[in-house]
Amino acid sequence: MGTQGIFGKHQLGWPVASREQKLNKRVYDVPADIDQEVARLKLAAMKIAIDRLTAGQQGYLSSWEEGT
């Protein structure tokens, strides 16, 4: 994703991190909604379009009952 994506995650993730009383010295995961928003903005800036998953595709991906 490059430096811009990492910086974007830091900027958008700061409100989440700042709600914590004390942050330990470790790597924190960025919430999925922020991660997806940064990716969407980066792709839009690069003029790259991707398809959205259908409801059936989303169900398939979130289910352990189907597939291999």
Image: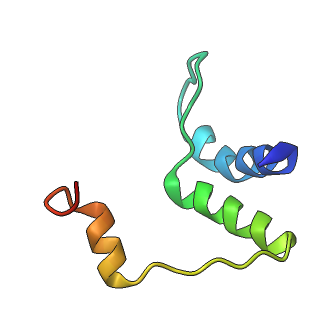
Give the percent coordinates (x, y) of residue 39: 68, 61
Give the percent coordinates (x, y) of residue 14: 68, 45
The residue at the far top in this view is 25
Task: Between residue 68 and residue 38, name the one nearer to us.
Answer: 68
Give the percent coordinates (x, y) of residue 54: 40, 84
Asked if 41 appears above or below 55 in the picture, the reply is above
Asked if 42 appears above or below 17 in the picture, the reply is below
Left or right, residue 39 beside residue 3: left
Color style of the picture: rainbow
| Quarter of the picture holding the C terminus | bottom left
Left or right, residue 22 beside residue 55: right
Asked if 34 appears above or below 29 in the picture, the reply is below
The residue at the far front in this view is 68
Quarter occupied by residue 60: bottom left
Left or right, residue 21 beside residue 55: right
Quarter occupied by residue 51: bottom right
Question: So how many labels did they put on this image?
Answer: 0
Task: Between residue 40 and residue 64, name the one nearer to us.
Answer: 64
The residue under the point 27% across, 72% down is 59
Quarter occupied by residue 43: bottom right
The residue under the point 86% across, 50% down is 4
The residue under the point 70% across, 53% down is 12
